[in-house]
Image (spheres, helix red, strand yellow):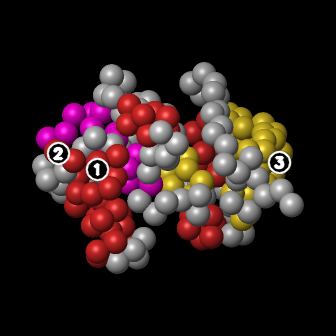
Amino acid sequence: MPADPAVETSGLHKSYGDVQALRGVDLSVETGSVFGLLGPNGAGKTTAVRILTTLLAPDEGSARVAGFDVVRDARKVRQHIGLAGQYAAVDENLTGFENLEMVGRLYHLGRGHSRDRARELLASFDLSEAGDRLVRTYSGGMRRRLDLAAALVARPPVLFLDEPTTSAAGSGSGTRSRRSSRRGRPCC
């Protein structure tokens, strides 16, 4: 029996006044796949991500993520997703380690598990040496990698990356994950 799609939309519409950001978006993303939504600025990509992550309600249509309706089952959707938005959402007054540990605690992973997961992700994103430094001392690429790591703390079955290359160009952020994938192991 085939698994439910990871993401499925039907007739998704969203307007801001007279501006139609989404006009009847239909898509189905297979579980376990990687899907990229490409388009020019203003095409509605971020609006679609905001709807799929329950941050915004659609005007019309329906959307399901991990088998749950984004409007009726928003809480369950949020329990099954990770999100790294356009801008890094990390606390500059904490260290990289403290940021990741805090996210783990917010997910109720427990102190020990949160600390272990923080160390694991810092290593996966080549941030171990910077883990004890305040985030305000990080470069833009390092902040972006930390933000991506934070989105993976709870091992979500569905991960949304809005503008995933913002501030990451030239940072080497993909080096580790590509290397790990070649060895048959997932990055995180």
Helix, strand or loop at mark 2 = helix
Contact? badges 3 and 2 (CB < 8 Å): no
Contact? badges 1 and 3 (CB < 8 Å)? no
Q: Position of residue 77 (x, y in %)?
A: 62, 64
The percent coordinates of residue 98 (x first, y second) are 22, 61
Quadrant containing the N terminus is bottom right
Q: CA distance from mark 1 to mark 3?
A: 38 Å
* Sequence-wise first label, 3 or 2: 3
Q: Earlier in the sequence, mark 1 or mark 3?
A: 3
For label 1, the SS is: helix
- In the rendered view, would you say 73 is above or below 51? below
User: In the rendered image, which quarter is residue 13 located in?
Assistant: top right
Inter-mark Cα distance, 3 to 2: 44 Å
Q: Disc 3 marks which amino acid?
A: Ser
- Magenta-span inclusion, residue 167: no
List the residue tagged with mark 3.
10
Q: What range is drawn magenta here?
A: 136-152
Give the number of callouts: 3
Instruction: Please tell me whether residue 78 is drawn above or below residue 92 in the rendered image.
Output: below
- The answer to whether the residue labelled 1 contacts the one labelled 2, judged by CB atoms less than 8 Å apart, is yes
Residue under label 2: 130
> Disc 1 marks which residue?
122
Q: Earlier in the sequence, mark 1 or mark 2?
A: 1
Q: Nearer the viewer, mark 1 or mark 3?
A: 1
Q: What residue occupies the far front of the structure in this picture?
A: 183
